[in-house]
Image: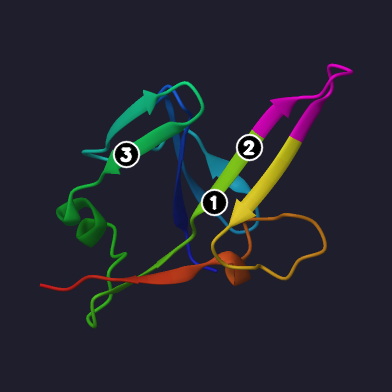
Amino acid sequence: MPKYYTIEVDPLARVHDYSVVYYRNLDSDWNMDGLITKATIDDDSYTLEAMIPINTLKQLNLINSDGYMRIGLYRAEFSMNDDETIDMKWISWVNPKTKNPDYHVDSSFGEFRFIK
């Protein structure tokens, strides 16, 4: 699996972005150029928005000549149980078919298609 880039955003729009060399060799000094995030928290939900310039994706060679980009989209939901333990739920748009949640595997990636 080639080097890939990760952007984690919390409900306050705080970002942890890093590059990864398979398997789990993380470089937290790397930052996504031009990334803008926004978050809105309501009474019973929150909304996250992120913007990455297309030129940044092209400079990283993430969009192929057919206009496709391999991408993983995930949601981590943490809540407090009554006994004060943390309940962690992991949601992926692609089933990685792993025994335990692991989003640092190739099988968890899908494709975006960019249309002009």
- The image's mark for residue 49 is 3
* Residue 73 screen position, x and y as percent: 49, 55
Q: Residues within 10 Å of mark 3 (few under 14, many from 20)?
A: few
The magenta-colored residue range is: 78-87
The residue identified by callout 1 is 74
Tell me: 71 left or right of 58.
right
Between discs 3 and 2, the one toward the N terminus: 3
Q: Residue at x 52, y 67 (%)?
A: 109
Vertical placement of residue 55 versus 69, above or below? above
Amino acid identity at mark 1: Tyr
- Residue 61 falls inside the magenta stretch: no
Which of pointers 1 and 2 indicates the residue nearer the eye?
2
Amino acid identity at mark 2: Glu
Query: Pointers 1 and 3 in contact (CB under 8 A)?
Result: no
Vertical placement of residue 105 versus 87, above or below? below
Q: Residue at x 69, y 55 (%)?
A: 102
- Residue 79 falls inside the magenta stretch: yes
* Residue 65 screen position, x and y as percent: 22, 80
What is the CA distance from the residue labelled 3 to the residue labelled 2?
Answer: 17 Å
Tell me: 105 left or right of 85.
left
Amino acid identity at mark 3: Glu
Task: Choose between 23 and 41: the one closer to the eye.
Answer: 41
Query: Pointers 1 and 2 in contact (CB under 8 A)?
Result: no
The quarter of the picture where the C terminus appears is bottom left
Vertical placement of residue 6 versus 35, above or below? below
* Residue 107 screen position, x and y as percent: 61, 71
The residue identified by callout 2 is 77
